[in-house]
Amino acid sequence: MKKKLYSYKNSGVDISLGNKFVKHISKLTKKNVQKTNRKKLQSNIGSFGSLYDIESLNVKNPVIVSCTDGVGTKLELSNKYNKLDTIGIDLVAMCVNDLIVQGAKPLFFLDYIAIDKINLQKLKKILNGILKGCKISNCELIGGETAEMPGIYKKDKFDLAGFSTGIVSKNKILKKNNVKTGDIILAIPSSGIHSNGYSLVRDILKKNKLPKEIKKDLLNPTKIYVKEILNLCKKNLIHSAANITGGGIIENISRSVPNQLSINIDLSKIKILKIFSWLKSKNISDKEMLRTFNCGVGFCIIAKKNNFEKIKTYFPKNYLPYQIGYISKSSKKLNFYNKLKW
């Protein structure tokens, strides 16, 4: 009886196919480097480690800021509806939007893709989204990892994770201690659900059909706020910022204000997107909506009141900041008043 010939490929891992994808990534990133003419980017794809020369940035007293994140169970719906061309934008956004909370300029990005079996068509779509997200953020994709893991992931399933590093001058770091009594809280609109709360969304969709007019909003890619926020930082127009991700408005704004000051938010001022109104109609409490979803507020900035008009000039019409609250001193850290207008 002939003995079984064991190989890595027969066990479910195709190294040759993985190498083919690496070559594809290398070609795309080289094109991107040529377009941006970034001399400081080394040839990294295929190397053991990724290099990035920060000497030419000329940042005084530089501080490195790093973030890592994923896109949660939004992956499931992207996979289900074969909407894979923008999930990479979400991945980049979830990292770089955290970097700019401290005023850091994103420098580079690395991704980690784990999948049951390499599917080049699927991976290329995901990669295109990642590259687009990097372009919007003005940062470089300098490396990553693609792991073929049969037995860990079910057929056609995959997961994504991202890592980004930024840089900021020590005296330019946005800190919550910059916040003062009388400062205003500005909401910047979201592009949709972004990448938080999709486990609840998926649970609701099991028994409810999404209306046709908002179906397109279900998988809108996360808005990347890098350009606008960094321009405001250059002009010293903001004191603090908050990326409204997991925990919603309730938890994230609290992280950007010192304990001795109070946050006052008029909930009736929030411009709620239609998709959130529909989700709310499926028997979710206001509190649960506010702590799970962004409800239409993707990012918040805290600034002097007299800077408001200047701040607005840095944003396109569909993402104009608007006031939802102010900072004061009181016995309560969080003061919500009036009701959300669903």
Image (cartoon, grey):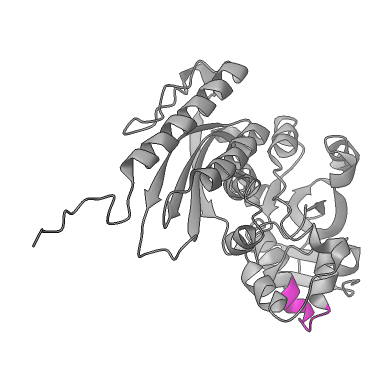
Q: Quadrant of the C terminus?
A: bottom right
Whether residue 255 is situated above or below residue 337 in the rendered picture:
above
Q: Nearer the viewer, residue 239 or 102?
A: 102
Instruction: Report whether residue 172 is seen.
Output: yes
Is residue 286 covered in magenta? yes
Q: Nearer the viewer, residue 8 or 239?
A: 8
Judged left or right of residue 17, residue 204 is right
Location of residue 49 (image quadrant): top left
Judged left or right of residue 140, residue 268 is right
Q: Residue at x 71, y 66 (%)?
A: 293
Whether residue 58 is situated above or below residue 90 in the rendered picture:
above
Location of residue 152 (image quadrant): bottom left
Residue 82: horizontal and vertical position, in percent? 64, 55
Whether residue 75 is situated above or below residue 199 in the rendered picture:
above
Q: Quadrant of the N terminus?
A: bottom left
Residue 5: horizontal and vertical position, in percent? 16, 53
Residue 322: horizontal and vertical position, in percent? 88, 51
